[in-house]
Image: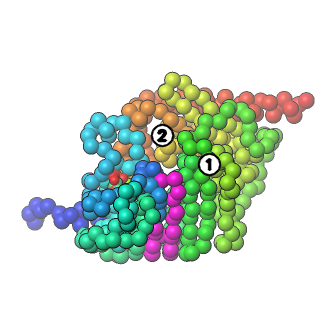
Amino acid sequence: MSSIQLLPDLLINQIAAGEVIERPASALKELLENSLDAGATDIAVQLEGGGIKRLVVRDNGGGIAREQLPLALMRHATSKIASLDDLQRVASMGFRGEALASMAAVAQVTLTSRNADVAHAWKIEAADGTQSDVTPAAHPQGTSVEMRELYFNTPARRKFLKSESTEFAWCEETFKRIALSRPDVAFSLQHNGKMVWQLAASKSTPSPYPLPEGEGFGGLPSPSGITSDLPARGLSRLASSSIRGIEGEEKHSLQQRITAILGPEFGQHAVNVERQIGPLHLYGIAALPAYSRSTRDEQYFFVNGRFVRDKVLMHAVRQAYQDILHHQRHPAFVLFLDMPPEQVDVNVHPAKSEVRFRESQGIHQFVFHALQDALSATMGSTASNQSA
Ligand code: ADP
Ligand code: MG
């Protein structure tokens, strides 16, 4: 046996990067969350080669001061929490101070930023465990993070990346999740120089937008039991140069963002869900069986604004649909659960898509009943319309 040694920082960061930056899409998620945490209202993403070759996220948020640029790239350096107390009520998307350091350990990273009251921007570059000096740069207020050649120095990991189109598809999914969660923010996504998504911000600022229950949205529900033959996600993409979801100056709401991202059919076969009990608030849109899917591709659940995949929530949803949906079909929904941060632990996994509820039984019941009531109200009226 060889003797025990402390690992060098670069290696520590490369090991950590395996968890935090698994693929381009995970880097994109971290960067989009950083931009939102910085208060950005406009976020532009540029990808090349599925995000492996180049991935840039540019925002108009608060920016990073010149002397903080080197710190931003260091492990366990964060401006978001300072104590265990903060950790228990964390409201920002990030808090681990790991993302940028991990990226800088497994890719070439350039961080360019300008905060409010300075004459120009500053930038810093990092790769292979070394940082450049901070030098002047041109950039409007906000931050751009550019990541190039993911895993260039860890070839074994690079081999695990999939094709450019698969990695792009993951990036696009990540982009959609975050864009769904913030209709008040403008987002765009370009791949290999082509605009793929352009989503205008809704005018009214505070997000998210609770919707009145049972009002339907977009159209009348279809008779139950009919499953529509909608094209699978991805097939609905027109020529790759076409721009989906272009939105004008008009006021945008959560519904409009959902329609822009999931298409009008979803809204035409969906009900609004809204219920508030004490500090628990569930709202969003759930598709009727007429718009069920053969895969789980349109299931979006957000807890305190964060996309999650959670067994308790999924089970509650499944149960609410169990009498109306064929067991081989999957419901489509976009649901938001807001609750006191101290009642949910988001610190379960570095990628933070898992959560742990303090009262999981109560959450399950709450979600199940809210959804079941919203669905049965509409399904019931559909049934009576048919018999009339
Ligand atoms: P975390 O988000 O967990 O704090 P990161 O490594 O993602 O860790 O970022 C480190 C720090 O860099 C953040 O705490 C923040 O202060 C700063 N930062 C990162 N991205 C941005 C951004 N887009 N705008 C402003 N500040 C940023
Ligand atoms: Mg972060």
Residue marked by disc 2: 304
Q: How many marks?
A: 2
Residue 41, relative to residue 366: is it above or below? below
| Between 193 and 329, the one nearer to me in the picture | 193
Residue at the spot x=37%, y=71% of the render?
Answer: 137
Q: What stretch is highlighted in magenta?
A: 40-56
- The amino acid type, in three-letter code, at marker 2 is Asn
Q: Is mark 1 on a helix, strand or loop?
A: loop
**Residue 353: x %, y % from top left:** 45, 48
Direction from residue 243 to residue 118 in the image, left or right: left
Tell which of 296 and 234 is nearer to you: 234
In contact (CB < 8 Å): disc 2 and disc 1? no
Provide the secondary structure element on which disc 2 rests: loop
Viewer can see residue 53:
yes
Q: Quadrant of residue 205?
A: top right
Q: In this view, does 171 lie above or below 267?
A: below
- Magenta run includes residue 48: yes
Drawn side of residue 289 relative to residue 312, left or right: right
